[in-house]
Image (tube, rainbow, N blue to C red):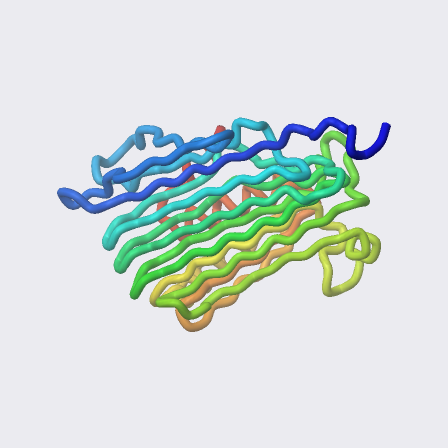
Amino acid sequence: MAPADRTKLQRARGRAEVSFCQRGGLARLERLHQSGCAKAMLPRVSGLRDAAPEVVFLNTAGGLTGGDRLGYGVELAAGTRVVATTQTAERAYAASGAQARVRMRAQVGQGARLDWLPQETILFDGAALDRETRIELDGDAQLLLCETLVLGRAAMGETVHRLRLSDRREVCRDGRPVLVDAVRIDDGVLARRSGAALFGEARAMALVALVAPGAEDAVGPVRACLAECACVAEASGWDGRCLIRLAACDLWPLRQTLIRVLTQLRGTLPPRVWQI
């Protein structure tokens, strides 16, 4: 069969966006857009009446493969506080040809706070993923961010030998970059992963970042929280930033440590979907 005669494979497309305003001293949903396989749910938050709303993004395609396109967006007006997460782990499956592409964009107004806490991304052998997260902070806005990557499922005996990953996060305050973090993994990196500057035998890796005025003061309590964890973990803080990097041989000990760290930084447990 000639290449021109081959049937074009179906690819997933989706976009979910939410925006919140401040009314009566509470954050209120102002706009909701959903298209394709991307959805945004707003479960009822139990507890205090003034608890921050939770947005749960969902990819109904069940995962990502080559050529898929997915986008999320969050916009917070001044003074609002919102927690955004994903319903479950995202899965990047083996791809032939093009990379899957995911874009996350957020605008956080003056005095507002966004907790962007997606659950882990599991990368399968042969996956190809290009992901970019860009968050704009106005004035003294605050951000708590957590991103986790997992190389295959240890319980299923999976090993990742082939991978094309470009995963970039950029946080700006008043238009000026204050945090840029990029991860690139390809077949060559996997082949020499035991190098001191790489991730060794780790299968699960995470970044937690608090970007807020005085965030560096959180380093001491976070280090105390990490003192007895079953992961390789380090915390640092400077100039309104607190960064924690973690790595483990499996997702379970990493996830348990993340829950403790996020609880320390938030003063409350992660979103309910993290606990299911």
Q: Is residue 252 left or right of residue 154?
A: left
Position of 272 relative to 209 (above/below) = above
Q: Of residues 267 and 121, which is closer to you in this image?
A: 121
Task: Return the x and y of residue 199 as percentages of the image width and height.
Answer: 72, 56
Task: Return the x and y of residue 238 as percentages of the image width and height.
Answer: 45, 71
Residue 158 figure quarter: top right
Q: Of residues 19 and 250, which is closer to you in this image?
A: 19
Residue drawn at 23 percent across, 53 percent down: 79
Q: Is residue 154 left or right of residue 225?
A: right
Position of 42 relative to 51 (above/below) = above
Quadrant placement of the N terminus: top right
Q: Of residues 17 and 141, which is closer to you in this image?
A: 17
Does the image show residue 251?
A: yes
Residue drawn at 47 percent across, 56 percent down: 134
Does the image show residue 275?
A: no
Residue drawn at 36 percent across, 54 percent down: 107
Residue drawn at 41 percent across, 33 percent down: 34
Outermost bottom residue: 239
Task: Return the x and y of residue 157 as percentages of the image width and height.
Answer: 78, 33
Q: Is residue 93 left or right of residue 48?
A: right
Task: Return the x and y of residue 163 as percentages of the image width and height.
Answer: 75, 46
